[in-house]
Image: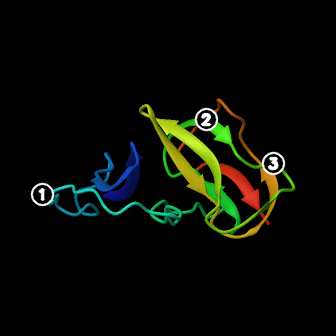
């Protein structure tokens, strides 16, 4: 199970999503939960539920899901702060902002607007 934060029309929701293909031993039994809107978040924390591949560096910004790159909000050489929005992904007609995990300088951008990306794929690198 993964927990995702979704913002829809200015309201933020935390939802639990079952990842298909997980073995029964590693996936906890689903628990019925009511979904209530949470308080709006001024600076959401980056998604920590996506495990980083072993080859990814500490400053790699990884895609938390499969989707399409809608907007790249930084350029190579730009200074970014921790939790700054750097990319917007679209999946299932929903836009999801992706935030910088650390402060630093954008070293490389590995995708371009319009690209399809897989979960765990490196979007950009911050050094």
Tell me if residue 54 comes above or below residue 67 in the rendering: below
SS for tag 1?
Answer: loop
Say left or right for 26 vs 91. Answer: left
User: Mark 3 — residue?
Assistant: 75
Query: Residue 93: where, in percent of width, then height?
Result: 44, 31
Between disc 2 and disc 3, whose residue precedes? 2
User: Mark 1 — residue?
Assistant: 32
Of discs 1 and 3, which sits in the foreground?
A: 3
Residue 90 bears which disc, if any?
Answer: none
Distance CA(mark 1)–CA(mark 2):
33 Å
Distance CA(mark 1)–CA(mark 3):
43 Å
Badge 2 local density, few (<14 within 10 Å), some, or many (20+)? some
Q: Residue at x 71, y 40 (%)?
A: 111
Query: Residue 76: where, in percent of width, then height?
Result: 84, 51
SS for tag 2?
Answer: strand
Tell me if residue 54 comes above or below residue 122 in the rendering: below
Residue 56 in view in this figure: no
Distance CA(mark 2)–CA(mark 3):
15 Å
For the N terminus, give its image quadrant.
Answer: bottom left
Marks 1 & 2, CB-CB < 8 Å contact: no
Between disc 1 and disc 3, whose residue precedes? 1
Marks 1 & 3, CB-CB < 8 Å contact: no
Badge 1 local density, few (<14 within 10 Å), some, or many (20+)? few
Marks 2 & 3, CB-CB < 8 Å contact: no
SS for tag 3?
Answer: loop
| Residue that sits furthest to the right in the current view | 77
Q: Residue at x 48, y 46 (%)?
A: 65
Say left or right for 22 vs 106. Answer: left
Q: Residue at x 51, y 66 (%)?
A: 45
User: Mark 2 — residue?
Assistant: 70
Between disc 1 and disc 2, whose residue precedes? 1
């Amino acid at each position: 199970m993964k927990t995702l934060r979704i913002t829809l029309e200015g309201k933020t929701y935390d939802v639990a999503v079952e990842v298909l293909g997980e073995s029964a031993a590693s996936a906890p039994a689903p628990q019925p939960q009511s979904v209530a809107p949470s308080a709006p978040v001024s600076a959401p924390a980056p998604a920590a539920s996506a495990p980083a591949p072993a080859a990814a560096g500490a400053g790699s910004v990884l895609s938390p899901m499969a989707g399409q790159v809608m907007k790249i909000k930084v350029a190579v050489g730009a200074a970014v702060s921790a939790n700054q929005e750097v990319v917007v992904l679209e999946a299932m007609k929903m836009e999801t902002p992706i935030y910088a995990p650390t402060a630093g300088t954008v070293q490389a951008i590995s995708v371009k607007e319009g690209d399809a990306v897989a979960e765990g794929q490196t979007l950009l690198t911050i050094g």
